[in-house]
Image (tube, helix red, strand yellow):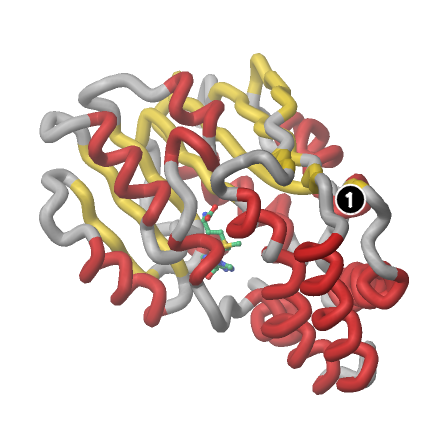
């Protein structure tokens, strides 16, 4: 079971960032191991941008289910991708998955970072996986972000408050580097880790989309942080404003540290 504080802080109020994701660019390790005809569960699928790519890849002989505990996101996912065969979206909670030994791959991308009990969630993902199937988790270590040149001090202060706000809800800011231990604790074997950093530089076509992510966080999560007393509205607004100016005038690159960790389920 999740704490109410973590549940509230994890709630996504704006889906622009996740709508712009794709299987090939945003979940590369999954794209590498998928095969046509597979059954796949995508946990915390949001509005289904990555899930739709999974369904297209496995084709009509496969079966893909995307689940999320946010009914508004699932409604959008259903609307966006209603024409893809073999793809279903359901409102469900990662802590209570209604599946047992059913999928070749159970995956979650950027979800465990928002949970106060990631081991419990991972155990549910293992339960849903077939014997000899794989669990694959992609997630961040937020303490290893890098901006060049350095982001404005106001944004660095906001970022520190953001990490404190998350820790206060029991979330692990370094979850990527703890996944291997969680996998071993879940009984998964043949555990492999691959570096999947999200890098963006000024010369990239999609630079604006990626570099504005922290302005978006300052706007949306920032308002919740103000409400929860972790930063003042003045500090939040200044961080957002300075960061947007920094993007226009100075930003060269941003690297967000992510690991993909996969393991095999050998037995129940
Ligand atoms: C950062 S978004 C990632 C969405 C997508 N997987 C991606 O990589 O773009 C995290 C998602 O996890 C979902 N989520 C958070 N807690 C959850 C829970 N307890 N059960 C199911 N989904 C959850 C959120 O609603 C949100 O859609």
State the SS at label 1. Answer: strand
Q: Is residue 8 left or right of residue 19?
A: right
Which image quadrant is residue 230 in? bottom right
Can you see residue 102? no
Q: Position of residue 83 (x, y in %)?
A: 10, 48
Depth check: 15 or 118 in front? 15
Hey, which residue is sitting farthest top in the picture?
Answer: 190
Q: Is residue 229 above or below residue 144?
A: below
Q: Position of residue 155 (x, y in %)?
A: 81, 63
Q: Residue at x 32, y 50 (%)?
A: 48
Can you see residue 162? yes
Q: Residue at x 28, y 17 (%)?
A: 35
Q: Quadrant of the C terminus?
A: top left
Q: Is residue 137 above or below residue 250?
A: above
Q: Position of residue 93 (x, y in %)?
A: 43, 59
Q: Residue at x 66, y 80 (%)?
A: 223
Q: Is residue 212 left or right of residue 60?
A: right
Q: Position of residue 201 (x, y in %)?
A: 64, 36
Q: Is residue 39 left or right of residue 170?
A: left
Depth check: 268 or 6 in front? 6
Depth check: 106 or 227 in front? 227
Kindly identify which residue carries mark 1. Answer: 147
> Label 1 neighbourhood size at 10 Å, few (<14), some (14-19), many (20+)?
some
Which image quadrant is residue 171 in? bottom right
């Amino acid at each position: 079971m999740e704490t109410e504080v973590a549940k509230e802080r994890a709630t996504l109020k704006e889906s622009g960032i996740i709508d712009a994701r794709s299987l090939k660019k945003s979940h590369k390790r999954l794209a590498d191991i998928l095969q046509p005809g597979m059954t796949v569960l995508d946990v915390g699928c949001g509005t289904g941008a990555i899930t739709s790519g999974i369904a297209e890849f496995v084709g009509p002989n496969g079966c893909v289910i995307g689940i999320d505990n946010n009914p508004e996101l699932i409604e959008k996912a259903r609307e966006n991708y209603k024409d893809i065969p073999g793809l279903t979206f359901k409102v469900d909670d990662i802590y209570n998955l209604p599946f047992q030994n059913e999928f070749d791959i159970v995956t979650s991308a950027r979800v465990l970072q928002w949970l106060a009990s990631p081991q419990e969630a991972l155990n549910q993902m293992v339960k849903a996986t077939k014997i000899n199937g794989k669990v694959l988790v992609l997630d961040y270590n937020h303490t290893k972000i890098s901006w060049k040149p350095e982001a404005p001090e106001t944004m660095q202060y906001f970022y520190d408050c953001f990490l404190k706000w998350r820790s206060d809800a029991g979330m692990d800011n370094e979850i990527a580097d703890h996944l291997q231990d969680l996998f071993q604790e879940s009984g998964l074997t043949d555990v492999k880790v691959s570096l999947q950093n999200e890098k963006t530089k000024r010369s990239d076509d999609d630079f604006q989309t990626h570099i504005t992510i922290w302005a978006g966080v300052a706007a949306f999560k920032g308002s919740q942080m103000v409400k929860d007393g972790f930063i003042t509205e003045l500090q939040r607004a200044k961080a957002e404003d300075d960061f947007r100016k920094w993007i226009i005038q100075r930003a060269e690159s941003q690297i967000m540290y992510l690991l993909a960790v996969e393991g095999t389920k050998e037995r129940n």
